[in-house]
Amino acid sequence: MPAIFGQILVGAVLLAVVALAVRSLWKTHKSGGHCTGNCGSCKHCRK
Amino acid sequence: MGNWPGVTVEKKEGRLRGRKDVVIQDLPGIYSLSPYTLEEVVARDYLVGEKPDAILNIVDGTNIERNLYLTTQLIELGLPVVVAVNMMDLVRRNGDEIDLEKLGQALGCQVVSMSALKGEGGMAAAEKAVEAAVAGRAGELPHVFTGSVEHAVAHIEESVSGMVDAGYLRWYAIKLFERDEKVMESLRISPELADHLEAHIADCEAELDDDAESIVTNQRYAYIHGVVSRAVKKKAAAHSLTASDRIDRIVTNRVLALPIFAGIMFLIYAIAMGGWSVSIGTRGTDWANDVLFGEWVPGLFHSILTGVGVAEGTWLYGLIQDGIVAGVGAVLGFVPQILVLCFLLAILEDVGYMARVAFIMDRIFRRFGLSGKSFIPMLVATGCGVPGIMASRTIEQDRDRRMTIMTTGFIPCGAKMPIIGLFAGAVFGNSPLVAVSAFMIGIAAVVISGIMLKKFRIFAGEPAPFVMELPAYHAPAPGNVLRATWERGWSFIRRAGTVILLSSIILWFLMGYGFEGGSFGAVEDMNNSLLAAVGSAVAWIFYPLGWVGENAWKLTCATITGLIAKEEVVNFFGIAFNYAGEADLMEDASGLYPAIAAAFTGLNAYSFMIFNLLCAPCFAAMGAIKREMNNAKWTVGAIGYMCGFAYVVSMIVYQIGGLFTGETTFGVFTAVALVLLAGIIYLLVRKGYQGEAVRNLRSVSAAGI
């Protein structure tokens, strides 16, 4: 496999991992981040 | 987390297993429906405002007299109530008997037994509550009060009957009799009506020669005493002691309590983070650092990357190996130590010892104006500072609550453990004294701050009485311990996979790129990087703390990145020293420790560690401080105080400690450190504010609830 394809593949995987990490942080932030004591905005409390 | 009053500060919602239509609201643990603490207000606002279909009141069978106080108030709400007597396994083991039928008849509601620890009766109790909710019939009100009180309450009921829901009429009437300000405000009682009610209350008070609130409290306990004497048979004679009492005689002994607590904490930190042969946490971390993240993971990434054509020396290879693997790996390497520590602390919580520690601390805290209630947030903060800061809501006096918020962050949370572990392992030969001293310095910082701050008018005043049930000692439930360990450990791992991973990438860029030879690009010398430029510009601030030399900017930047999350400090060192080639993971599996050991002396390592343990917490905890203070000035003051205190303590340690180790000579900063030390001693011993104008404001009023 030419090196350029390998680099693109690794770059794409890395981007996907970064996107997942950002998404996870964003979702946590939207659901109140750490426990705020306000159960109305907490996804864990609404389970 | 223990579910004793003072820990849960908010309501939590769930659904009954197998009954998706049944919603259960878990309210904060409370002893009464009085309006003095935030958790009492949260609970009673829900019970009165949301009008639940039924109340399942779980009471401690080993201390039933204390718990029935709340039960009598709940029954007055006019809602269907089911009482579940918990800890029945302990009641039976003690040889006591509780006649549930008699108890139910006396209270006018259904009473069932359960043991949460053994997993017995919980579901049956919930089913009974569902049945009661479906029936929708409240029990008969018990005759708690004497004729004089009933007479006044009847008049009050008559006066406010059109103003409240008929079901709640008696509860409102009793609260008005007690002159409950919150209830009076909510009903918008007119001055004329207030005068009318006051006349009835005053008549009763004159007749019984006591104030209304005390009359109600005393008569409730008198009634409960009668109920308990009929329904509960205590096997043990009054003078005999249970096993728990015998243990407590030693564990909470005035002289022995603190040495025992220090000994237990030493043992725990030694097992989790020490260098003994039984220190399984350190052994796990050594393996994770040396083998897992030292050989296997970098080796695996090396094979994958070179296999697909990403050669060594390219930026992509460097980003993944020097940035992500080195940074995240440095943090994840401490997971074994954190899991062992959390596991041992969870055992202490579950057996009931931590409740005793709050009791022991009450004696110490009370001397400088705080109560043991302030220790509970600190206990919670050993896991994470955010819920610890939130747990301060249970403190009745606003000034004490604010002071607790300002000092809770001094206790080392889980995220600070990698910093302690790193320096203990790299510089201090895995001495358990380093970890336990970090914990003790946290407690000492709380005590010293408490004594100093209480000298000022804004914090002056007597603490509220601290009442807490000490649960009987029992074997830890494996499920509880493992769940608590997993929750804390998983939270740490999740942060490594998100915030630490992202910041590893940013740090790799900032440490690897900059201006060199007049142009921007990858730098040969990390001291020319963007981060070095920023760090060097502000590193002088920390020179008095011993953060000097070519690594000064690294220590400064590590501390600043620690504001994102405290694990970032270790992440930063992982990248910085790996990047510089000082700790090449591919060549020397355990390279980070020698690199750290070479960069620090024992004294400036300790100064750096102390500053990072005591200074401003992470952004999440700062957000919690802002929410709980609900005031910009107080928030800035709290964070400023923490940073200032951390700076002063670290400076004193380095400058004065250096005179003994020969690391410093007497100079301007040594003189400043001596003056600061003298200032602290003066604040500790000087007389506090003696005036009358102490700030007496309840937390409930300050929060505007």
Image (spheres, rainbow, N blue to C red):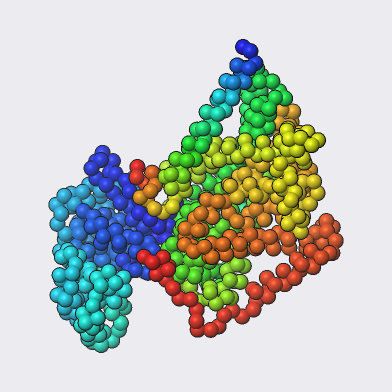
Q: Residue furthest top?
A: A1
Q: Position of residue A26 (x, y in %)?
A: 47, 40
Task: Give the side of residue B7 with respect to residue B95, left or right.
Answer: right
Which residue is more in the foreground, B255 or B552? B552
Residue A29 in the image: x percent, y percent? Answer: 46, 44
Q: Is residue A6 left or right of residue B203?
A: right
Image: B652 above or below B566 = below
Taking the spot 71% from the left edge, 31% from the top edge, the residue there is B585
Q: Looking at the image, which is closer to me, B704 or B427?
A: B704
Residue B138 position, x and y percent, is: 16, 59
Q: Is residue B390 above or below residue B683?
A: above
Which residue is found at the position 47% from the left and 58% from the top? Answer: B627
Residue at horizontal 21%, vertical 53%? B53
Query: In which quarter of the view is residue B185 placed?
Result: bottom left
Q: Quadrant of the C terminus of chain B?
A: bottom left
**Whether residue B563 is visible:** yes
Asked whether, in this view, residue B475 is left or right of residue B368, the answer is: left
| Total labels drawn | 0
Instruction: Find residue B668 and report its horizontal and vertical position in percent.
Output: 81, 65
- Residue B222 versus residue B515: which sits nearer the camera? B515
B415 or B259, which is in the foreground?
Answer: B415
In the rendered image, the vertical position of residue B354 relative to residue B285, given as above or below:
below
Residue under the image location 71 percent in, 28 percent down: B586
Query: Can residue B105 be seen here?
Result: no
Please indicate whether residue B46 sits to the left or right of residue B252 in the image: left
